[in-house]
C-alpha cells in the first residue's frame, strides 16, 4: 500500500571522483561575483584548492572569502552578511564540512535581505517567516556526515549553559547544486571518519523509521545504509579499499541528507540539540555515542506499546541489511541490529558522555530540552524516564 507523499526540493546533484573540476563552469551559470565560504583548514590546505581558485580566476570571477572556525554561530552569519551584503554577490560556494556548509547556506539566505539570522532561528527569537530572496548556493562537502549539501536547514549554535543549537530552515535555502566529489574526502582523519560516518548512519536509520517516512525515502535510506555498511569500517581502517569505501560514505552521507530533509529525524538528533549546545561536543560524536542506546530504547518501547508499528519491521530489516544475516525472527534481527551498533561504537572508539563532560546531574535539563523538531518524528513517543535511561546508559 503506497500512501500519499510529497518530496520537497532537492539540489541538482553532481556526484563522482573528480567532479570538483566542474565547479568553475557550474559557478559561471550564476555570475562572476563569488563568495567562498570554507572551514578554517582542510580545503585551503588540500591539493584541490589551487587549481580550483585558478580555474575560477581564469573565468574572471571575483572572489571574496569567509572562513568559519568551529561550529557556526548566529554572530558569524550576521558578520558575513554585514561585510558582503553590499557587494552584489551572484553565488555563494560553501566548501567544507557541515559547519562550513551550514554557515554558507545561512549567509546565502540573508545576503540580499540583510537582516539578522536571529529573526528566523527556530525556538529562539521571533521566528519571523523567511521571505528571501536567497542568493544561489553551491555546496561542496569535504566530509561524509551531515548531508547538509541536500538539506534546507542551517544549524547554528551558541554554547554554554544558556546555549542553543537551532535551525534556520526554509526550502529556499536548499543548495542550487551539490557537488559531491569523494576525492575531496581523502586525508580525513580516522576520528572524523568515525564521528561523521556514525552521523550519516544515524540520519539514515532515523529517516527510515521516522513517522514521516515514505516509500521513496525508504528506498533511498536502504541504499544509503548498504553503502555505509560497506564503506564505514573499510574507510576508517584504511588500506587498499579506502578510495572505494570513502566514495560509498560520500554517497551514504548525501542520501542521509536527502532523506532527513523529507522525513525529519528521531531521538538521537532530539538529544544532539541540547547536548551540542550545553557541551562542546561535535555533532557526529553525540550521534555516534547515542545511536545504539537510542535504538535499544526505541525498540523496547515499540515492542511494549506499539507492537503493530511498521518501525519494528524496519528495525529488523536494517538488522538483516547491516549484518548480512537473516535469523527468520524479526525480534532476533532487531537484537542483532543493537549488538552491531554497539560493536561499531566500540570499534570506532566513540567516547562515553562522561568522558565528554556530561554527568548524571545534567540529565534532567538535557531531557527537558530534547523535545525539539527531531524528537517529534521519532517512531514512538518516549517518556522522560526512557530518555533519561538512554542517556544514563552512555554516561
Ligand atoms: Zn546529524
Image: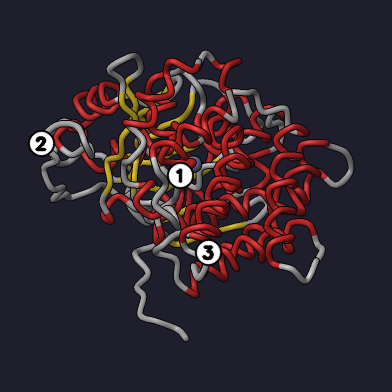
Q: How is the image coloured?
A: secondary structure
**Could you tell me which residue is drawn at 62 percent across and 59 percent down?**
224
Q: Quadrant of the C terminus?
A: top right
Which image quarter: residue 289? top right
Report how far apart the C-alphas of labels 1 and 3 lie in the structure.
14 Å
**Could you tell me which residue is drawn at 64 percent across and 65 percent down?**
223
Q: Is residue 76 positioned above or below 343 on the image?
A: above
Disc 1 on helix, strand or loop? helix
Report how far apart the C-alphas of labels 2 and 1 lie in the structure.
26 Å
Q: Which residue is mark 1?
A: 267
Front residue (pair 71, 41): 71
Disc 2 on helix, strand or loop? loop
Q: Which residue is mark 2?
A: 126
**Could you tell me which residue is drawn at 22 percent across and 26 percent down?**
78
Disc 3 on helix, strand or loop? helix
Rendered location of residue 260, percent (x, y): 44, 55
Judge left or right: residue 27 versus residue 332: left
Q: Mark 1 vs mark 3: which is more N-terminal?
A: 1
Neighbour class for label 3 at 10 Å: few (<14), some, many (≥20)?
many
Q: Is residue 22 visible in this depiction of the protein?
A: no
Rendered location of residue 106, percent (x, y): 30, 38
Amino acid at each position: 500500500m503506497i500512501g500519499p507523499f510529497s518530496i520537497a526540493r532537492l539540489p541538482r546533484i553532481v556526484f563522482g571522483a573528480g567532479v570538483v573540476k566542474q565547479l568553475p563552469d557550474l559557478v559561471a551559470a550564476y555570475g562572476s561575483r563569488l563568495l567562498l565560504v570554507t572551514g578554517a583548514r582542510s580545503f585551503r590546505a588540500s591539493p584541490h584548492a589551487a587549481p580550483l581558485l585558478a580555474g575560477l580566476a581564469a573565468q574572471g570571477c571575483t572572489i571574496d572569502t569567509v572562513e568559519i572556525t568551529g561550529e557556526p554561530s548566529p554572530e558569524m552569519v550576521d558578520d558575513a552578511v554585514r561585510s558582503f551584503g553590499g557587494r552584489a554577490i551572484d553565488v555563494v560556494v560553501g566548501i567544507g564540512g557541515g559547519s562550513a556548509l551550514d554557515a554558507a547556506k545561512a549567509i546565502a539566505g540573508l545576503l540580499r535581505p540583510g537582516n539578522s539570522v536571529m529573526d528566523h532561528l527556530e525556538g529562539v527569537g521571533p521566528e519571523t517567516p523567511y521571505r528571501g530572496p536567497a542568493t544561489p548556493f553551491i555546496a561542496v562537502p569535504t566530509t561524509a556526515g551531515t548531508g547538509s549539501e541536500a538539506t534546507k536547514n542551517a544549524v547554528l549554535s551558541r554554547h554554554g549553559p544558556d546555549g542553543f543549537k537551532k535551525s534556520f530552515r526554509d526550502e529556499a535555502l536548499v543548495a542550487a547544486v551539490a557537488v559531491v566529489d569523494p576525492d575531496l574526502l581523502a586525508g580525513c582523519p580516522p576520528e572524523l571518519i568515525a564521528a561523521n560516518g556514525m552521523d550519516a548512519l544515524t540520519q539514515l536509520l532515523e529517516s527510515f523509521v521516522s513517522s514521516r517516512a515514505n516509500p521513496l525515502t525508504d528506498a533511498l535510506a536502504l541504499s544509503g545504509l548498504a553503502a555505509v555498511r560497506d564503506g564505514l569500517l573499510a574507510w576508517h581502517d584504511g588500506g587498499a579499499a579506502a578510495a572505494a569505501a570513502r566514495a560509498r560514505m560520500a554517497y551514504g552521507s548525501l542520501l542521509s541528507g536527502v532523506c532527513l530533509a523529507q522525513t525529519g529525524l528521531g531521538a538521537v538528533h532530539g538529544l544532539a540539540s541540547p547536548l551540542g549546545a550545553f557541551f562542546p561536543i561535535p555533532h557526529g560524536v553525540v550521534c555516534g555515542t547515542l545511536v545504539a542506546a537510542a535504538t535499544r530504547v526505541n525498540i523496547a518501547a515499540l515492542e511494549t506499546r506499539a507492537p503493530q508499528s511498521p518501525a519494528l519491521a524496519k528495525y529488523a530489516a536494517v538488522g538483516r541489511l547491516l549484518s548480512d544475516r537473516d535469523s527468520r525472527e524479526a525480534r532476533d534481527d532487531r537484537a542483532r541490529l543493537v549488538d552491531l551498533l554497539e560493536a561499531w561504537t566500540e570499534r570506532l572508539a566513540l567516547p562515553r558522555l562522561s568522558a565528554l563532560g556530561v554527568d548524571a546531574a545534567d540529565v534532567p535539563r538535557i531531557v527537558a530540552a530534547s523535545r525539539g523538531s527531531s524528537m517529534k518524528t521519532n517512531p514512538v513517543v518516549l517518556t522522560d524516564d526512557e530518555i533519561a535511561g538512554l542517556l544514563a546508559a552512555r554516561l
